[in-house]
Image (cartoon, rainbow, N blue to C red):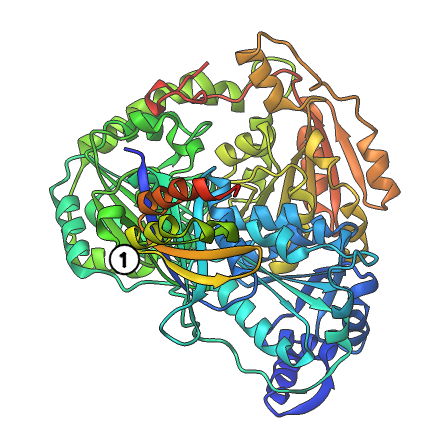
């Protein structure tokens, strides 16, 4: 069954490792849906988080190939039900939207979004949540794009 | 030379100011390196300049193409068990290593390749002979790194050797910028013994070992497969003890060849596409299949959906990524082959499987009748590859080192050459690299100078790296080169005949005069065209003090059988 898997990789901070990891996917023609790399809670240990669509058998083998890399400490895979995740989305809207008064304020309140910055040309609002929620707000803001 | 090397190695423990280039050489000496295969060029010149002062400690072999350096280092590593070392310059020098790196990667050969790189301030500027060697070599190395500071050189080399030789061995590349070679450092060398993120071998799970032993003890038809992992782990004797104690017939993969004596009574021959009839058929009849240090390559398994479905599979393998990769294991033993087989030897009970073993012999008799007799004692006028190889093998009493290229001759040689000693087979298994044998044979000869090394090569593959004749002449390595010439790319032609309606598309070769080529490189040579001259030709080759080239004209359109056609089950192996 093809579904989404989140792969978590803990590594040394080694030059070129990102390339070494991604070619494992390229070689097997697996598209990476998203990829984040940063230092983990342990100093000096880096965490890669990748999301792919695939089958469990393939993912198992993939994770073994990743773990085989000299500079990888450990790799894990999870299905959506096993992970806590949310997206952060930023929306850039014309400052004219503020002139709509209550409508725009209401939108922000209803979606539990918040205003990050107000510039003379545009405002930026932020929303965290699951993809459906951030997409919903994206649709709701369309009314204010062209203003 | 051995003791001198050690002295220099010992001195290196003290801190000493030197250039990065000299530190490269001192680091190699600290790793007991006595042979390097390489080719100089702009970006590696400081290292070559440092090498000039160490010529008496390190034998540098000047190959004629960097690909030759990698294959020679592979041949050296395969027969000696040591790490093969290569030098190459930046850009084209480094890219010429790629084929050899890929070959070493898939066949688990320990190599350390050191490439020069343009100065660090020029990286990314498309400088002369600049290539992203790290990026280009990433997919074909076990590990690689770039060094841009002199003081990082000893640590990188120590890590490289540790990674190349430990766990499942493989090739490592270190790219050193020219400014790092010129830079100064306080040199001291600490061998690498541990890398936090790297587990070269896992501890054997004894519960699993007990499960495996129980399976073996209750098996009626056990069958053991010997891969190169047995040789790499030096587990040859342990595996023999196991098969003898429990009376288990075994067969070897192409890469496992020579791990045991060919004529051992439990040795049933070679697995795979052109392997022997019985081991292929019996794979689908056994009840317990014990795979030791092998990875179920598609040339071994044929159609995996019809491979050993009836059997319980015990997979002994050092690389966890190989477990369940191709064939699911009922009992996986992730461990060094020696450790795992030692543990099994304590747990398995003495047994007898006479009927089962006899059934192999009955099946083998069919192959003898339909294939082997025709190969070894042909009635037709043209010579077969099999009879030539067997003749050479018999004259060497099984003590020779066989180096093969890729194609029909490789399969004929693997089937008919006989081995008494381990580490006697050098071939390009996983990658199937034509042009491998000539440089690999040079490396093998330097890795075991006391042994006779015979390179069996086809007319096609020989022409891919024949410039290494010059290296062989210059080093006076007594490599015996046997060209089996059918004036065809024989294996491709065989496939064209069997699967492409005899449409011989670009496989016939108009060849040069190989004897003249050899003589131009000042290597004595002889051509044999008729069976009655074969004996004296082979004698001349084997009696020659130095290198020698023997060209034997063989039947133009012979095929290699048995054969498991691509995509077929091992049970569907064809005898004709």
Residue B570 in the image, given as x and y percentages of width and height = 35, 25
Q: Is residue B457 above or below residue B529?
A: below
Taking the view exactly as shown, the residue that stands out farthest to the right is: B520
Residue B304 lies, with reference to residue A14, above or below; the image says above
Instruction: Classify residue B208 as left or right of residue B304.
Output: left
Front in this rendered view, residue A100 or A10: A100
Splitting the image into 4 quarters, where does residue B283 fall?
top left
Q: Give residue B526's quadrant in the image.
A: top right
Left or right: where B512 falls relative to B432: right
Q: Is residue B227 above or below residue A41?
A: above
Q: Is residue A62 visible?
A: yes
At mark 1, the secondary structure is: helix
Residue A119 at x, y percent in the picture:
54, 61
Residue under circle 1?
A: B340
Give me the residue at 76% from left, 54% from top: B91
Q: Residue furthest top?
A: B501
Foreground: B58 or A18? A18
Query: Does residue B406 appear to the left or right of B212 in the view shown?
Result: right
Q: Chain of mark 1?
A: B
Tell whether B271 sits left or right of B156. left
């Amino acid at each position: 069954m093809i579904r989404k898997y989140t792969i978590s990789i803990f590594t040394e901070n080694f030059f070129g490792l990102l390339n070494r990891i991604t070619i494992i996917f390229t070689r097997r023609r697996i598209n990476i849906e998203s990829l984040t790399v940063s230092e983990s809670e342990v100093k000096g240990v880096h965490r890669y988080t990748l999301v792919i669509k695939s089958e469990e058998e393939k993912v198992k083998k993939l994770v073994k190939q990743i773990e085989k890399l000299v500079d990888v400490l450990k790799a894990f895979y999870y299905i959506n039900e096993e992970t806590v995740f949310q997206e952060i989305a930023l929306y850039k809207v014309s400052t004219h939207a503020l002139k709509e008064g209550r409508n725009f304020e209401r939108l922000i309140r209803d979606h539990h979004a918040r205003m990050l910055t107000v510039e003379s040309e545009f405002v930026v609002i932020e929303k965290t949540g699951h993809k459906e929620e951030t997409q919903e707000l994206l649709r709701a803001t369309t009314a204010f794009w062209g203003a | 030379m051995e003791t001198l090397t050690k002295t220099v190695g010992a001195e290196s423990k003290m801190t000493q100011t030197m250039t990065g280039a000299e530190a490269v050489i001192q680091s190699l000496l600290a790793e007991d390196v006595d042979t390097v295969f390489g080719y100089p060029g702009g970006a590696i010149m400081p290292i070559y300049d440092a090498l000039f002062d160490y010529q008496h400690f390190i034998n540098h072999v000047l190959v004629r193409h960097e690909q030759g350096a990698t294959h020679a280092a592979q041949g050296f590593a395969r027969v000696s068990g040591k790490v093969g070392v290569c030098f190459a310059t930046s850009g084209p020098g480094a890219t010429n290593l790629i084929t050899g790196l890929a070959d070493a990667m898939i066949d688990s050969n320990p190599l350390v390749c050191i490439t020069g790189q343009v100065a660090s301030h020029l990286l990314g500027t498309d400088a002369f002979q600049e290539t992203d060697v790290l990026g280009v070599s990433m997919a074909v190395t076990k590990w690689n790194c770039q060094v841009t500071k002199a003081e990082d050189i000893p640590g990188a080399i120590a890590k490289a050797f540790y990674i190349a030789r430990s766990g499942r061995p493989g090739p490592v590349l270190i790219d050193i910028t020219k400014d790092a070679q010129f830079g100064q450092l306080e040199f001291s060398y600490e061998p690498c013994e541990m890398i936090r993120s790297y587990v070269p071998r896992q501890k054997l799970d004894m519960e699993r070992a007990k499960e495996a032993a129980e399976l073996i003890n209750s098996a009626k038809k056990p069958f053991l497969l010997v891969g190169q992992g047995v040789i790499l782990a030096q587990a040859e004797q342990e595996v023999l003890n196991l098969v003898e104690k429990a009376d288990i017939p075994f067969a070897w993969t192409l890469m496992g060849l020579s791990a045991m004596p060919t004529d051992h009574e439990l040795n049933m021959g070679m697995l795979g596409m052109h392997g022997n009839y019985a081991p292929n058929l019996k794979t689908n009849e056994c009840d317990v299949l014990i795979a030791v240090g092998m990875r179920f390559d598609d040339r071994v398994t044929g159609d995996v959906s019809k491979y050993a479905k009836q059997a319980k599979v015990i997979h002994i393998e050092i690389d966890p990524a190989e477990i369940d990769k191709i064939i699911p294991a009922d009992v996986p033993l992730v461990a060094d082959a020696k450790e795992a087989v030692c543990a099994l030897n304590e747990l398995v009970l003495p047994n007898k499987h006479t009927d089962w073993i006899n059934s192999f012999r009955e099946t083998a008799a069919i192959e003898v009748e339909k294939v082997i007799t025709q190969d070894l004692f042909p009635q037709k006028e043209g010579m077969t590859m099999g009879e030539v190889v067997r003749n050479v093998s018999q004259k060497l009493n099984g003590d020779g080192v066989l180096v093969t290229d890729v194609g029909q001759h490789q399969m004929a040689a693997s089937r008919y050459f006989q081995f008494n000693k381990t580490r006697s087979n050098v071939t390009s298994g996983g990658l199937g690299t034509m042009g491998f044998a000539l440089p690999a044979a040079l490396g093998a000869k330097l890795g075991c100078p006391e042994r006779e090394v015979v390179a069996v090569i086809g007319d096609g593959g020989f022409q891919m790296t024949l410039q290494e004749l010059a290296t062989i002449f210059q080093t006076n390595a007594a490599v015996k080169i046997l060209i089996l010439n059918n004036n065809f790319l024989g294996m491709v032609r065989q496939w064209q005949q069997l699967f492409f309606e005899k449409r011989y598309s670009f496989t016939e070769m108009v060849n040069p005069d190989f004897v003249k080529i050899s003589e131009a490189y000042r290597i004595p040579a002889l051509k044999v065209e008729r069976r009655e001259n074969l004996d004296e030709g082979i004698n001349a080759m084997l009696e020659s003090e130095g290198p020698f080239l023997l060209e034997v004209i063989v039947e133009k359109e012979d095929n290699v059988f048995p054969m498991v056609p691509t995509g077929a089950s091992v049970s569907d192996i064809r005898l004709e």
